[in-house]
Image (cartoon, rainbow, N blue to C red):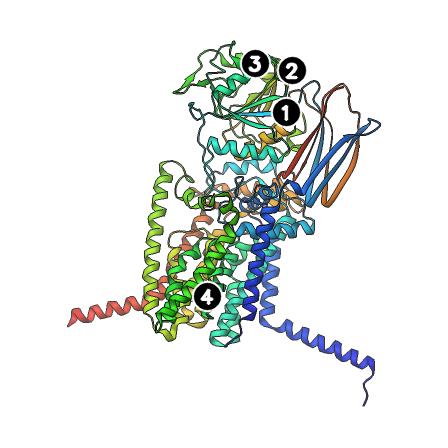
Amino acid sequence: MKSDSRIVAIAVILIAVMLIGEIVVYTSGTDSFNADATITDDGDGIEYSVSSSGSNIYSVLITDNDSFKSIDTLYIYYDSTYESNYQPVTVAVGAKALTQEYYIEQLIKTVEYRGLSNVITVNAGELENLMKQDTSSSGQAVVVISGALPDTVYTGVSSDYIFNWMSNGGTLYWLGSLLGSCYATTTEIITVTNDYQTLFFGGDCLNTTDTSNAYSEITDNEYGNLLSLTYNNVKYAVNMTAMKTLTSDCLFVGFTEDGYASIAFIKYGNGMICILGGDYSNKQISDLAQIVTSQLCYNSKLIESYNGSVTRSTSTGTILTTIPKDRNVVVYIYLGGYFPVYGEAFIFSAT
Amino acid sequence: MNRTESDVKVLRICKIAHNVRSFLKNPIVIITIIGLIIRLVIGIFLNYNYDVYHWGTIIQNYESGNGLYGLDGYYYTPGWGYILGVISSFQNLLGVDMIGERILEYLPIENYTEWFLSANATTIAFNITLKLAIFICDIVVGYLIYWIIMDITHDKKKGTIAYALWFLCPFVITIAAVEGMFDTFSTLMTLLCIIFLMKNRYFLAGMMFCMAMLTKFFPGILIFVLIAYVLLKHKDNIKEGLKCIVYAAMGVIITAIVMFFPQIMKNDIMVCFSFLTSRASTGLGGELGAIGGTGTIIAYLAIIIVSIIISIHVYKSPKENADKTLLSMIMINITVIFLYPSTPQYMVLIVPFLAMYIVMYDRQFIKPWIVLAIGTTLFSLSGNFTDLMSIGAFTDILSTQTVMDLSNWFQEPIFGLSKMGWIYYSGAILQYAGTVLILWTYFKDKIYECYHKSSKITDT
């Protein structure tokens, strides 16, 4: 009879592989990474450092946001007692259904590991309380995934709280349907019959055509590539030409088809509207998290960027460039490229 | 005569040279070298990005602190995720800093909606370091096949042929080298479980069974046959047989607790099985999905019933042939599982048992092996030129435009079906034919026998 000692050895190695793998999987995390950025003593650039216990590519983006105040609190609207216009999507075989609840759960986790931890879920009543305040709402942002704003803040008229809140500096991140085309009550979705696009944008600009997949990159700026944006869908998105005729205070990033932009930032009063195109998708979650945590806004201008690589060490560097002291500057560092594993924004407010 | 120091050195070198020469002349070594070279070349040039990119997403998810199930991307029980944990650690050690990119020029590929294609391309370094682990596993599986045959027959030639039938099997190569699929790990654990059962190491057998099942679900269906085998071996002392099963069950339970520990602590163990409910319900979506889902459930219930019938046959078999019965009935049971049409990678599990059966018991089974080798290989390569996406994106060998032109050409229809469709469906049909042929080859004599018996009765 053959001795089975070698076979036992193979089994022991296999068990060890499983155990080590389990430990690796459940001890990995943002503790394995670190990033820092400061303005040089001479004020002529940014000193950064990036650490990783593994091997990762990283990107450093220095953005001039002019007077736009960075987001410090992200609110996500969700109210199960209200009707929603959330349209179910087909997911990959084996995947968990991308419900509104799962979308929100994933969004919260994604923005957290990319550096934004102040995330609060609000219901229709709490959203009303937030938006009816007549004080500055700069630094506040609300993500609406339900496809319809609740009637507590929007009913299709210009006196609705949502407009006042945005005018006071709030930022609205919108996706999944045509912004303003309907609103939700506890019992139904009501279609807005008046010119809802004019209410939000001052004129028509949203994609009501069948165009959805986008095959070109927006070339006005490099943010799409630098932020590793992935979702090439322009359904419900903003038409760049139409928007530019309405206001110059806008920025488009990502992908484009038939003039529509997959992501658009548009100034509204002292605040902003950001529209992400396409049906609900995991790629959209990643892009949304990336633009929120990188603090991109309608007047973002890329000052400088740098791509590098770090392996089980700390990589440091200085990017020499003029840092305008009278403007809000954001340095966003993220590791992993198209597979982000860590991100952090360093905000240098105007002095 | 005294040997000088230099003589000793020369002798030593000669001895080493002789050992190296005889090592290299060993057919197993030759087969391994040939198989590895083929795998490495194919693995560098071809890559099924849709799946391999997903492995990258899983690594991204846990590196970001969200474990295997915190973010969308991992649709299996935890086994493969843990193996990926070790692979990614090696990749980190080797300095593989970039997993992949979304390639603008490839975006139209996602318009071929009936296929699982993605514009995301993984880097050559990521692909090959990941696949190397799968190649090593392929070698170990081959060694276990060789070991079982040597243990039963003591015939090196048979062992070597079976090793070749596994390691040089075209679709075992493409599943590892092109698809980067991990079914070989589950196969390895299944073989270890069987060896430990044969060697009366029940606790270890239970551990391996659990690991195999939690890496890819299919070996789980073999539980009935495996229990029947243990009881058959202890037919004279059923109490002892039951004791052995309890030992094995302890191995299963302890392994399951360890592997599910993070989910047990979160009180969220069902998330590990979402692939089952999703595949049977929401995955496909709509009414078609519901019908397909119900069909899947009925099919698997039927498979379980047939597996129980097979296990009863095992238990009723003569004790002296227990090992042969086990190996042949596992081959039959796996084949029955795949009567519910499977994707190519699942077929990897059947190859070791088919190879062992061919060399030890019946050479006629080479026919289904050949049919599967053609069919499943075609099936696994139906991604055709899209498998060149990584080479197009990250090297100068091919341009992204060339890859797109070739891929688009493959989408053009011939007789109402795209070239890709022809490869896919002809491969799938041949694979299914090969599966049926295994059962036909095994049962045809018994069917003829029954037919002749009934004819004789009718005549009298």
Residue B54 image label: none
**Are the residues flagged by discs 2 and 3 from a single subunit?**
yes
Classify residue A189 by image quadrant.
Answer: top left
Q: Measure how far apart labels 4 and 3 are at the Cα level.
A: 69 Å
SS of the residue under disc 4: helix
Amino acid at circle 1: Asp
Residue A301 x/y as whole percent: 70, 23
Q: Between residue A22 and residue B173, name the one nearer to us.
A: A22
Q: Earlier in the sequence, mark 2 or mark 1?
A: 1
The residue at which mark 3 appears reads as A133
**Are the residues flagged by discs 3 and 1 from a single subunit?**
yes
Q: Circle 2 marks a residue in which chain?
A: A
Q: Circle 1 marks a residue in which chain?
A: A
Q: How crowded is mark 2: few (under 14 residues within 10 Å), some or many (20 or more)?
A: few
Residue A116 x/y as whole percent: 62, 30
Residue B31 x/y as whole percent: 58, 67
The residue at which mark 2 appears reads as A248
Q: Residues within 10 Å of mark 4 (few under 14, many from 20)?
A: many
Q: Can residue A212 be seen in this view?
A: yes
The residue at which mark 4 appears reads as B202
Q: In this view, does B77 lie above or below A229?
A: below
SS of the residue under disc 1: loop
The residue at which mark 1 appears reads as A72
